Image (spheres, rainbow, N blue to C red):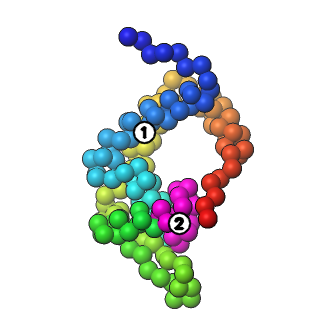
Amino acid sequence: MSEPKRESTLELMRWVVWGQRRIADDWIRDRGLTHEQSAVLAYLSKNPDAIQRDVARATRSSAPGVSRLLAGLERRGLVERRTQEDDTRSRRVRITPAGSELIQGFEEAMDRVEESILAPLGAAGRARLHDLLEQLASRVEPPSFP
């Protein structure tokens, strides 16, 4: 049975994202992580000593949501959080060596996923798609959380 034709551009975009997520799921699931956890660990591996608020912003999460997510990663020994001496309301987050080891290879795995999905476009098609998506993304309001 063939797939139904997708009429809407946004429906096509959702379909591509679903494909990316399905492929990425295997890598992430093999490590006992969720997409959100892997995104946070990847962010922290590139941004050591990030402020918890920046983690929330980068992952488009609410402050309470990212706090719960970080608490779970902290219980697993994958991140550590500490209150700043000069601002007790702000917490710094650092990936631990165990977290770094677990997430090692994430970027390469996601690059392979991207390659498998975008391969039919060629370099010029990819550049054009990227430019178009940047135009669209610039018009989307970032989430705001109380």
Residue type of the residue flagged with mark 1: Arg
Relative placement, left or right, of 55 versus 29 is right
Residue 145 is situated, as x and y percent measured from the top left of the image, at: 60, 61
**Vertical comparison of 25 with 141: above or below:** above
The quarter of the displayed image where residue 40 is located: bottom left
Label 2: which residue? 63
Q: Residue sitting at 56 percent across and 66 percent down?
A: 54
Q: Which circle marks residue 42 in the picture?
A: none
Q: Which circle marks residue 21 in the picture?
A: 1
Magenta segment main secondary structure:
helix
Q: Which residues are magenta?
A: 50-66
Crowd tier of the residue under label 2, counting other residues whose Cα lies within 10 Å: few below 14, some 14–19, many 20 or above: some
Residue 17 is situated, as x and y percent measured from the top left of the image, at: 50, 35
Q: Quadrant of the C terminus?
A: bottom right
| Residue 31 among those drawn in magenta | no
Residue 122 is situated, as x and y percent measured from the top left of the image, at: 56, 26
Q: Is residue 135 visible?
A: yes
Judged from the image, the secondary structure of the residue bearing numbered disc 2 is helix
Q: Residue sitting at 31 percent across and 69 percent down?
A: 75
Which residue is more in the foreground, 115 or 102? 102
Residue type of the residue flagged with mark 2: Ala
